[in-house]
Image (cartoon, helix red, strand yellow):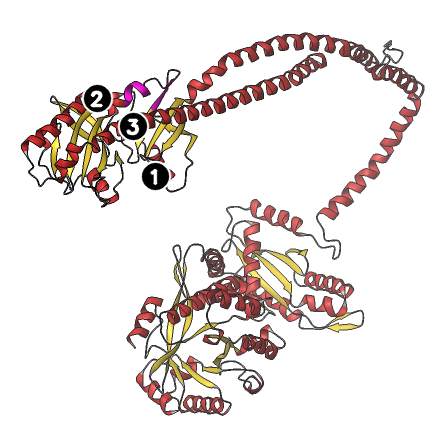
Amino acid sequence: MSIKKSLRIILIIFSIIPVVIIASISHGLISYRLLQVQKENLKKAAELNRSGLESMIETHKTEINLLSVEQDLINLVNEIYPADDLLTDTVNKILKDRKDYNPYCCNITLYNKDIIAVASSDTDQIGKDGKKDLTLSYLYATNKTAVGVSGIVSHKSNSDPHNAIEIGFPIFNTSLSNKSPVGYIVSMLQLTYFDHFLDGVTFGNTGYAILLNKNGDILYHPNKKLIGSKINSTRLAEIVNEYNNGLLQLSGTFEYKYENTNQVFGYCIIPEFDWVLLVKQNISEIQSMTKIILMLLVFICSVLLIFIILFAHSMAKRFTEPIIALRDAMRTASDGDLTVQTNIRSKNELGELSKSFNKMLHIIKTNYEDLASMHDELLSNEEQLRRNYDHIEYLAYHDTLTNLPNKLAFLDYVNSVLVSSPGAKKMHAIFFIDIDNFKTINDTLGHEYGDSLLIHTAKILTSIGDNGMLARTGGDEFLVFKENLSSKDEAINYASNIIERFREPIDLDGETVYISLSIGIAIYPDNGLLPNTLIKNADIAMYKSKEAGKNRYTMFDSSMEDELNRNISIIEVLRNAIDNNEIYVKYQPQYELKSNTIIGFEALMRIKSNRLGPLSPDEFIPVAEESGLIIELSHWLIKEACKFNKKLIDYGIPPKFVSVNISSVQINHPGFVESLSEILEETGLPPEYLVLEITESTLVSSITDATKLLNNLQKIGLKISLDDFGTGYSSLNYLTRMPINTLKIDKSFIDHICTSKKDAHIAELIISLAHNLQIKVVAEGVENEDQLALLREKKCDYVQGYVFAPPLHPEELEDLIKKE
């Protein structure tokens, strides 16, 4: 596309966009303002016509009220029913005359104080009991005027049914001091009474009024068939109730989709009757008024577009003519005619560009020979550039410290070997080699010695065998690829040779160091068909060597990957266990042997995954500790245990101790003591009923000053239990110097306490030693009566195990404690 055409299009687009945006915003603002004005009109119409409705009801109330003070009516309700026929006939005539006077009045009935109809404009009503009538019940209970209390009632007049409402007044005998009513008068008013008044409330073609009571019954609607029925909208039916509950103002507006149409409603509550008058109009009809404005805006935009197109064409021509002239001159110069000149006389940047172009051609012409000689010089430098490229390529594929191939070169080489014989039955091996404790050498001797060690290691590995490729992949890791092995034993022998070779000391500039290597071996094609897969599996096998004690080799097998994948799956489960409700707590009770009663219980974390099923604590706890997720999970466990124990105390159950195991990862986490204080404050559990179970190994591996930590925990009131005593260091320093409240004998001693005199004697010594130090003893894992009897004989304080109860769900433990 030419620059002239592009410039014209850009000018048109950037000129018309602001016009369109302003027009759109204007149209939107006008439409919004029109909608707001119409909302206010609907609201005012509802408020205005509410007054008219109140006046109409008030007129009818006045007519009925005048009847209530007629002496003949008062005399009749004071008579014992049935009353004198002459008086009854007189009152019936008064009521009928009043009913005939008002064409919208269906019936007027007089009731005595016992709510028995004693007179009526409809003589069939005389004698009827009105106790079940809501209007009469309201009059009897409140002694106040009742309007529409019974909702919409149906009344037949000349065999034609009419929807009506009841208006009732209590009748008082003013000659008596007693203020209780002597009777009641009830008038039935047809709903058509409102038609003439409300039919005049219209807005456009879709706007009209709707009158509802608090039950959602339609008292007025332009569609007469709907009068007397429930309105088919919960939102509209609940307006009066929302006002009575303080959720709505007396009047207002809202937008609502009614009868599948978006509509605007203005409403006004009539509190005296619990009615609401709605005046509504379709939003689409209101918005249709803006079409004229939209058409005008479109016309204005069209005129402006024509003007902008003409203006853009003129401006594009003015600015592009010099550019086109300059382009033609450049084409001529590019064809070899360096004598061409441009004659642009503009006093702007294009004029300056023309002058600069002419000057440039002059310089090029006069320096053509210099350019030619420069070209020759560039050709002479090409060889040097090629040599530099070769060096850069070498750096890309080699390690600069050891001059060994790097991982990229290693992958290229292995891939080429595997691709060259895809179907051949050949065996190859990749060895993943890592220097053990390399960081220690860097930290103690310095990085210069570390680099020297890497160079020596590379030389030694190079000297061991051939028929393969050695590469350094980074840090202290090396890769070896051995081709065309005769058997797996050949790979094992090669790895053994490496291990043996590095048993000898290495001299690093006067410093003698001993190092060992951990090696992982992956065999092609058994352990993978692709280079990256083989390297990954060799890496996994190498880490198995590390876990097994270092200074050894390990052959990869699929179970290693399965274990790794299993651990990854467990980590994913643990990471989301709390959110997915896959973690829960079981409690195993602890019994005091002296009283045979429950004195506490241990909280045990359990996981039941939707994907992996139930997970054993022996499986998921080490993974949680290694991944650090144990901190979040243990925090959740402690909080749940405290909440449960506090609930038991609140039920009136005598307080019990709840024990929770604490991981070395958690106890070493910053803010551990503070987080315990927050949990106790949040749950309200007294701290003396929370016991932290800490193993000997935790105290040694996690902190340097265990005594200070345990003292801080006891300062806030917590109890400390030394868990799994006898399986770790069993140092008497723990018992004499650290503030320990209880000591738990490990299950491994309890299992053989009845069959091994040695275990029984050790258990007795532990119990005796603890008692002499004023420390209580808990035996865990007690599973039979013989073990229980022996522990009772040895004066063990507390027992925990299946002999009394397995780990229980919270509800089961609660029932067990209550039964006790």
- Sequence order check, earlier mark of 1 and 2: 2
Residue at the location (59% across, 66% down)?
671
Q: Is residue 672 magenta?
A: no
- Mark 3 highlights which residue? 57
**In the image, is residue 91 above or below residue 14?**
below
Location of the C terminus by quadrant is: bottom left
Residue 500 found in image quarter: bottom right
Q: What stretch is highlighted in magenta?
A: 194-209
Mark 1–mark 2 contact, CB under 8 Å? no
Report how far apart the C-alphas of labels 3 and 2 lie in the structure.
13 Å
- Name the outermost residue toward the right: 366
Q: Does the magenta stretch include residue 197?
A: yes
The residue type indicated by label 2 comes to Asn
In terms of depth relative to the viewer, which is nearer, 206 or 249? Answer: 249
**Label 1 Cα crowd, 10 Å radius (few <14 / some 14-19 / many 20+):** some
Whole-Å distance between the Cαs marked 3 and 1? 21 Å
Query: Where residue 306 sits: x, y (%)?
Result: 63, 8
Query: Considering the numbered disc 3 on the image, is that residue within a helix, a strand or a loop?
Result: helix
Q: In this view, does 101 lie above or below 418?
A: above
Count of marks, rendered view:
3
Q: N-terminal of the two: label 3 or label 1?
A: 3
Work out whether residue 491 can be spotted: no
Q: What residue type is labelled 1?
A: Asn
Q: Is 626 on the left or on the right of 454, as rendered?
A: left
Q: Residue 102 carries which label?
A: 2
Left or right, 84 with respect to 743, comes to: left
Q: Furthest residue to the front? A: 175
Rounded to the nearest angstrom, the CA distance separating label 1 from label 2 is 32 Å
Q: Where is residue 183 in the image (x, y as percent from the top left)?
A: 18, 39
Residue that numbered label 1 is attached to: 241
- Secondary structure of the residue carrying numbered label 1: helix
Q: Residue at x 19, y 33 (%)?
A: 186
